[in-house]
Image (spheres, rainbow, N blue to C red):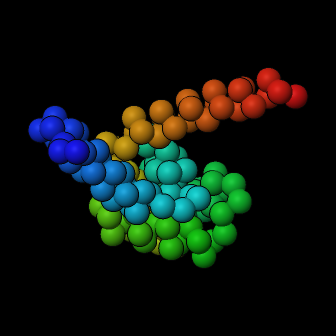
């Protein structure tokens, strides 16, 4: 069976979307990155504030995730001129492009929780 031009085009589009999803998941992989991004979409936060807000994350894991998010240009690390020196993290303009995604994920999570509760 020979594929039509439309079928070939659809497969190519599907393949490109799957590749793009894999790229996105690589950048946002893990349990914590989306939560960190969501927090920083509302306001800049210090390390200790993030550690408190993202419940369950260890200090070592938070440090690792922050470095990875900074490397991917999603957040900005700022050294504040205070005594003692403190560090603040904020979402970059590029990182703000994920705000809608975090809202959609949150909405889906709320709906999913309600759906699962129906059975109990």
Left or right of residue 101, residue 59 in this image: right
Q: Which of the pair 71/3 is nearer the observer?
A: 3
| Above or below 110: residue 47 | below
| Above or below 63: residue 22 | above
Q: Residue furthest right?
A: 120
Left or right of residue 77, residue 111 in this image: right
Quarter placement of the N terminus: top left
Residue at point 47%, 40% (across, down): 102
Residue 6: image location, x then y, percent: 16, 35
Residue at point 53%, 72% (across, down): 63
Q: Which of the pair 32/1 is nearer the observer?
A: 1
Residue at point 49%, 45% (across, down): 38
Determine if residue 44 is in view: yes
Determine if residue 87 is in view: no
Residue 78: image location, x then y, percent: 37, 64
Left or right of residue 20, residue 80 in this image: right
């Amino acid at each position: 069976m020979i594929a039509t031009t439309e079928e070939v085009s659809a497969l190519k589009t599907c393949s490109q979307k799957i590749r793009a999803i894999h790229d996105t998941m690589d950048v946002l992989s893990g349990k914590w990155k989306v939560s960190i991004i969501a927090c920083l979409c509302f306001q800049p936060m210090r390390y200790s504030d993030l550690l408190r807000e993202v419940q369950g994350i260890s200090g070592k894991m938070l440090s690792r995730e922050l470095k990875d998010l900074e490397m991917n240009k999603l957040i900005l690390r700022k050294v504040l001129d205070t005594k003692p020196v403190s560090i603040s993290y904020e979402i970059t303009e590029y990182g703000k492009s994920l705000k809608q995604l975090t809202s959609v994920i949150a909405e889906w999570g709320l709906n999913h929780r309600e759906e699962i509760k129906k059975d109990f």
